[in-house]
Image (cartoon, rainbow, N blue to C red):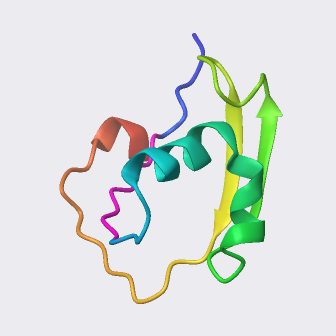
Amino acid sequence: MAQSTPTHVIDVESEISCPADKMYDLLKNQLTQLPVIFPEIYKNAQVLEGDGKSLGSVRRWTYVIHHTSDEILEVDEKLTK
């Protein structure tokens, strides 16, 4: 039986000064431009598998989170053993 990989969810809210459809297009279709547009936040953005847009694609984002805090909402003990 294959082992499952832990899933990490990051939920972020940010105010932006551009139309939402432009930001959505950037995140969906132009991921590799993030480090060019926001170099202070995004250090790298790559498409590792697939075209980066369709189901099954694997994308890696390297970014810096400033002034962050977290809250543990739930722990699945089966995954921590």
* Quadrant in which residue 45 is drawn: bottom right
Between 4 and 20, the one nearer to me in the picture:
20
Magenta segment, prevailing SS (helix, strand or loop)? loop
Q: In the rendered view, does 28 fall on the left or right side of 58?
A: left
Q: Residue 35: horizontal and vertical position, in percent?
A: 74, 67
Residue drawn where x is 29% and y is 43% of the image: 77
Q: Is residue 30 above or below residue 14?
A: above
Residue drawn where x is 23% and y is 69% of the image: 71
Residue drawn where x is 59% and y is 17% of the image: 55
Q: Residue furthest left?
A: 73
Residue drawn where x is 62% and y is 77% of the image: 41
Q: Is residue 13 above or below residue 51?
A: below
Residue 81 shows in the view: no
Q: In the rendered view, does 40 fall on the left or right side of 3?
A: right
Between 23 and 67, the one nearer to me in the picture:
23
Let me know if residue 38 is in the magenta part.
Answer: no
Q: Is residue 73 above or below residue 27?
A: below
Image quarter in which the N terminus is found: top right
Q: Which residues are magenta?
A: 7-14
Q: In the rendered view, does 8 fall on the left or right side of 27?
A: left
Q: Residue 69: horizontal and vertical position, in percent?
A: 32, 80
Q: How many marks can you see?
A: 0
Q: In the rendered view, does 28 fall on the left or right side of 17?
A: right
Q: Residue 10: horizontal and vertical position, in percent?
A: 39, 56
Image quarter in which the C terminus is found: top left
Q: Residue furthest top?
A: 1
Residue 70 shows in the view: yes
Q: Is residue 24 above or below residue 14?
A: above
